Structure formats: structure tokens, C-alpha cells
Amino acid sequence: MIRRLFLGLVLGLVVGALVAFGLVGGLHQALFGADTGGAIFAYVAAALTGVLTGLVAGKPIWASGAKIEAGLKAFFGALLGAGLMFALRQWVHITPDVAALAPGISPAELQNAAVSAYPALSLPILAAVLGGFFELDNTGGSEKADEKGAAGGAKKRVADGKANGKAGPRVAEDDDAEAEEASPAAKRAKR
């Protein structure tokens, strides 16, 4: 469980860092501005980060039978990403001194910028939280059930009969039943 949580956190950090790199390096958006356009852009970036995290964390979209699950995680990842960005913007007012993350921005703007204003800080945090959540949610129950069923050996009904004077069904392992069914046919073939 701890391994899953760690994997989700790392995977989320990577996804968030890639989206942040695209915003800072590609679009030259080093800060989400304090005006309305910057806030909307921050929520859109958080939703996009949530979608991408939902597609790759937990059971990824490329796994067999994971298309619907990944689609649902992507949808709710967008909602949760925007909600987490709202929480960061409203309640987390830590102002880090990270001039290297915002090249070309005046020191006056950087002085009042909270964590949520930096895509390079806020998006990896959001994605790490979502990645950890999606990895913990992915229990892998169907894989374990398949392994347990194969290892335990399914039993099937062989014949009705009396054992020790009591009537009841006899049950045998699959391999034993196949051997019993094959042996009379093999005896007939030898004759």
C-alpha cells in the first residue's frame, strides 16, 4: 500500500512537472496572474493536469479493459484538479522565494505571489495528490481474484452417488475429472 502511494506520488509529480514545463517553457506563462484571466487559466491548467493524471495513474488507459475506468478517472481528475486549485488559491498563502521558477518577472510581483500562482509549484502538487489518490484507489482486485481462482483450482461436480451410505454429490478437482474422463476413452481406444 505504501509502495502504491509512493508510485502515485512520483507519477503525479512527473505529470504535473511536464504540464508545468509546457506552460513555463512553451507558453512562457511563469505566473498565473492575479487578474481574472490568470485565475481562469490556472483552473484550466489544473483541470488539464487532473485529466492527464487520471489517464496514467492507477490503472492506465493502455491497460487491457481500462478504457472506461481511465475515462472516469480523467473526468473526475479534471473536477478534483480544479477543486484543489481553488483550495490552493483560497487557503494556502505561502509566498516562496523562487525567482528561478519565474524568469523575467519583476521582484515586486514575485514578493506577493503565493504557491498557487506558480505553475511549476502548484501543478506538480495537484498532480501528486491526485496520483496518490488514484493509485490507492486502484486495488487490482480482479487480477488477484483471477490468480486466486487459478491457484485454488475450481471444483466441479463429477457424479451423484452414495458415500458411506449417505447420498450426496462427489466433487473433484478439474485436473482429476479430466483424467477420469480421458482414461475410459483411452481404454476403449486400446481395445
Image: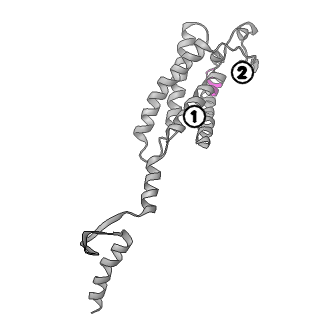
Most common SS among magenta residues: helix
Tell me the kind of residue under disc 2: Leu
Does residue 21 belong to the magenta stretch?
A: yes
Does residue 172 belong to the magenta stretch?
A: no
Q: Which mark is residue 101?
A: 2
Task: List the residue tagged with mark 1.
Answer: 132
Q: Disc 2 vs disc 1: which is toward the camera?
A: 1
Question: For numbered disc 1, what is the local secondary structure?
Answer: helix
Question: For numbered disc 2, what is the local secondary structure?
Answer: helix
Where is the C terminus found, in terms of image quarters?
bottom left
Q: Where does the image place residue 106, in percent across and percent down from the top left?
A: 74, 9
Which residue appears at 42% of the width and 40% of the height?
67
Q: Pointer 1: residues within 10 angstroms few (<14), some, or many (20+)?
A: many
Which residue appears at 61% of the width and 41% of the height?
2
Chain part drawn in magenta:
20-27
Tell me the kind of residue under disc 1: Gly
- For the rendered model, the colour scheme is one colour
Which residue appears at 45% of the width and 28% of the height?
76
Q: Where does the image place residue 73, in percent across and percent down from the top left?
A: 46, 33
Q: Is residue 60 above or below residue 83?
A: below
